[in-house]
Image: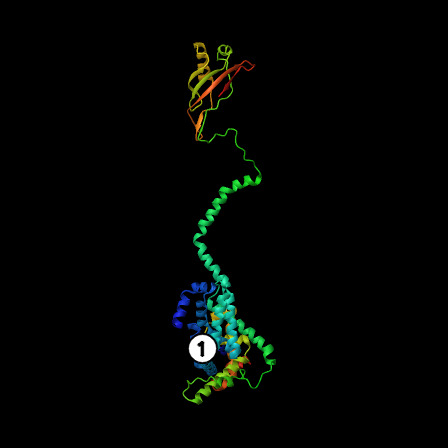
């Protein structure tokens, strides 16, 4: 069964699907993971900026989903509920990261997960037209990730959900428990900051109206 | 439209979230404002850049970790599964079972109250024997003033009679087995037996039925003027 078919079936029978999850159907859990694992991993990765942390966040998110599914009453959609947990878990990990990981010692012999270049070079997909183009793409992605990492969490999560995951304003507002106006405002401020940091990768660096307004 | 307002709306414009009216105003403003056009250009580039980011593949071991987790979790919530199975089993019989228990309580709780309040269950004096067959039961009879007593007073020995007793306890017929058989005594016996005496009838399975009984009549002149009837 393809992802689309599974997704379609889930949308059609979300109540029945949740029932199956609540009685502990292993098959239903596997379907759930198949549907959301990649999306949650992407969000966690973009928010945390670290593959290992993102993987742990995904595992922890699903653990919370399994434990909490019995209490799920359908007040919001299943997807919204899952994303809320994932966002909350990512936020917790980011706080923990800030507090402890920076102080932790690391060995120069082990693979450095903190260095995106070092880790990416091992995972370069052979999709670019030339090696130079592939390297340029990696460099751009690295710059974007660094720019994202430098944003405040409240701005970063909104940008990840809107610009990378393509969720609607309403969906983001529901997931984050914010008003629509706050979502738009955070998106505006986040993009402004991001645009400033990614100037070499977008348009010519002219003094723009938004910078004048922000200043 | 002012640039300040246009800049804020440009984000929604890029996201294609503006209404037709406001989008039209932005379009008009962009035609005359190079700064905002530049801003739009940058925003569109940023938007394109963010959308072009490759989706990161989860580490290979994450899939395995997730499968183990799912397996553990489905095992971990075994009580939930067991409860669901029990619920499916009980649901079809729930209504009949509850009705049965309710009716049992309805009928037996009054009886329970008898046991727990210490009430005595005594056999009634007026109990009807429920054996297969019982004889008519004679009893002491008091004579009324209408019966001629003189003939009885002159008796020296008891009169023995065989009496047929009907279902309602009245005497249907009788024959003298031993004793005087003169017309005066027979008349007194007729008056006595047919009009005065009522004998509890014989019973068959607790229901009254016809029966025969042998009686011995003796007269004891006392203050109450009674005749002892001995079966």
Q: How is the image coloured?
A: rainbow
**Which residue is label 1 attached to?**
B14
* Residue at x-position 57% and y-position 41%: B116
Quarter of the rendering containing residue B170: top left
Hey, which residue is sitting farthest right in the picture?
A103
Count residues near mark 1 (Cα–Cα under 10 Å), then give few for <14, some for 14-19, many for 20+: some
For the residue pair A24 and B123, the one nearer the viewer reads as B123
* Residue at x-position 43% and y-position 53%: B92
* Residue at x-position 44% and y-position 57%: B88
Quadrant including the C terminus of chain A: bottom right
- Asked if residue B89 can be seen in this view, the reply is yes
The number of discs equals: 1
Quadrant including the N terminus of chain A: bottom left
Identify the chain of the residue marked 1, using the numbered disc in the image.
B
Q: Is residue B213 above or below residue A189?
A: above
Which x, y percent locates residue B21?
A: 43, 72
Q: Is residue B76 above or below residue B94?
A: below
Q: Is residue B133 left or right of residue A214?
A: left
- Asked if residue A208 can be seen in this view, the reply is no
For the residue pair B228 and B33, the one nearer the viewer reads as B228
* Residue at x-position 43% and y-position 89%: A131
Which x, y percent locates residue A45?
A: 50, 78
Secondary element at image label 1: helix
Which x, y percent locates residue A2?
A: 38, 72
Which x, y percent locates residue A102?
A: 59, 80
């Amino acid at each position: 069964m393809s992802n689309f078919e599974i997704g379609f079936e889930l949308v059609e029978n979300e109540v029945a699907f949740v029932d199956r999850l609540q009685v502990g159907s292993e098959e239903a859990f596997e379907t759930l993971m198949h549907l959301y694992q990649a999306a949650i991993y992407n969000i966690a990765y973009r928010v945390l900026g670290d593959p290992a942390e993102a993987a742990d966040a995904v595992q922890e998110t699903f653990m919370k989903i399994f434990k909490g599914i019995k209490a799920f009453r359908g007040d919001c959609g299943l997807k919204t509920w899952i994303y809320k947990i994932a966002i909350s878990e990512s936020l917790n990990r980011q706080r923990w990261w800030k507090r402890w990981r920076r102080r932790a010692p690391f060995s120069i012999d082990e693979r450095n997960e903190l260095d995106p270049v070092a880790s990416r070079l091992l995972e370069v997909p052979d999709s670019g037209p030339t090696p130079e183009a592939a390297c340029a793409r990696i460099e751009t992605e690295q710059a974007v990730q660094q720019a994202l990492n430098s944003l405040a969490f409240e701005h970063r999560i909104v940008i990840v959900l809107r610009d990378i995951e393509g969720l609607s304003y309403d969906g983001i507002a529901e997931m984050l428990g914010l008003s629509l106006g706050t979502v738009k405002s955070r998106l505006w401020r986040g993009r402004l900051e991001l645009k400033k940091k990614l100037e070499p990768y977008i348009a010519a660096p002219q003094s723009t109206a938004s910078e004048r307004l922000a200043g | 439209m002012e640039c300040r307002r246009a800049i804020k709306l440009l984000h929604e414009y890029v996201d294609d979230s503006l209404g037709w009216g406001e989008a039209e105003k932005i379009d008009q403003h962009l035609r005359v404002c190079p700064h905002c056009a530049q801003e739009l250009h940058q925003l569109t580039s940023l938007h394109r850049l963010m959308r072009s980011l490759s989706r990161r593949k989860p580490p290979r071991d994450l899939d395995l970790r997730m499968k183990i987790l799912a397996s553990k979790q489905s095992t971990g919530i075994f009580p939930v599964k067991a409860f669901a199975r029990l619920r499916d089993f009980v649901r079809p019989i729930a209504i009949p079972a509850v009705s049965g228990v309710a009716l049992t309580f309805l009928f037996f709780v009054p009886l329970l109250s008898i046991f727990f309040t210490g009430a005595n269950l005594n056999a009634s004096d007026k109990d009807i024997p429920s054996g297969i067959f019982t004889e008519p039961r004679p009893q002491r009879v008091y004579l009324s003033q209408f019966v001629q007593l003189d003939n009885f007073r002159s008796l020296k020995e008891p009169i023995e009679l065989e009496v047929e007793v009907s279902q309602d306890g009245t005497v249907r017929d009788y024959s003298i087995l031993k004793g005087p058989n003169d017309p005066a005594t027979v008349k007194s016996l007729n008056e006595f037996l047919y009009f005065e005496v009522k004998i509890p009838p014989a019973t068959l399975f607790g229901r009254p039925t016809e029966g025969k009984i042998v009686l011995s009549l003796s007269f004891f002149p006392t203050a109450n003027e009674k005749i002892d009837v001995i079966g």
